[in-house]
Image (spheres, helix red, strand yellow):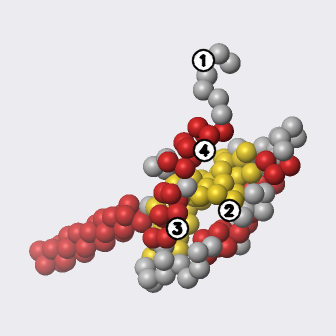
Amino acid sequence: MEGMIQGAGLFFRIFAESSAAFALADGSGAFLMVNQECDHIIKSLALPHARSLERLLCNMPPYTDFLKTTEAERRLSLPLRDGNNQDRRLEVTLWRINEDPAAQPAERGPFMGISLRDQTGEWMEERRLEEDVHQAEQAVEAKSIFLA
């Protein structure tokens, strides 16, 4: 295509330098590549082993069975306890990269594209708001009892 930039180098740079957390996994779910942001999220989990998140995902049927379905994309909410014994929430988005019979064997696929997003801050804020609502409801009930 005329005027289009071609080359795997540019696509690799987009993957590697993106501010979004991306990984590439093979058909069994094993990570083949992670970009800097994904590596940052994985390290922030302080899990006992560098591949602990990958191992955790590979034991989850919604993750490992994804390529056996016809779905193009799947989102998972992953509650976990990090290495510092803190509750965390990750959003894991999977998308299918179909097999390409014309590609070199190592690049044939199928593969899974993976996007990670740390939702811990949003989840903690949601929990705080729920607690505030609960306390407000208790205060209204106590006031009603007092005024009765």
Mark 4, mark 2: which one is toward the viewer?
4
Amino acid type at circle 1 is Gly
Q: Nearer the viewer, residue 144 or 105?
A: 105
The residue labelled by disc 3 is: 42
The residue labelled by disc 2 is: 31
The residue labelled by disc 1 is: 3
**Mark 1 or mark 3, which is nearer the start of the sequence?**
1
Mark 4, mark 3: which one is toward the viewer?
4
Q: Position of residue 143 (x, y in %)?
A: 15, 74
Compute the Cα span from label 3 to label 2.
12 Å
The residue labelled by disc 4 is: 12
Amino acid type at circle 4 is Phe
| Number of other residues with Cα within 10 Å of mark 2, as a class: few under 14, some 14 to 19, many 20 or more | many
In the structure shown, which secondary structural element does the residue marked by tag 3 occupy?
helix
Q: Nearer the viewer, residue 79 or 28?
A: 28
Quadrant location, the N terminus: top right
Whether residue 31 is visible here, answered yes or no, is yes
In the structure shown, which secondary structural element does the residue marked by tag 2 occupy?
strand
Amino acid type at circle 2 is Phe
Mark 1, mark 2: which one is toward the viewer?
1
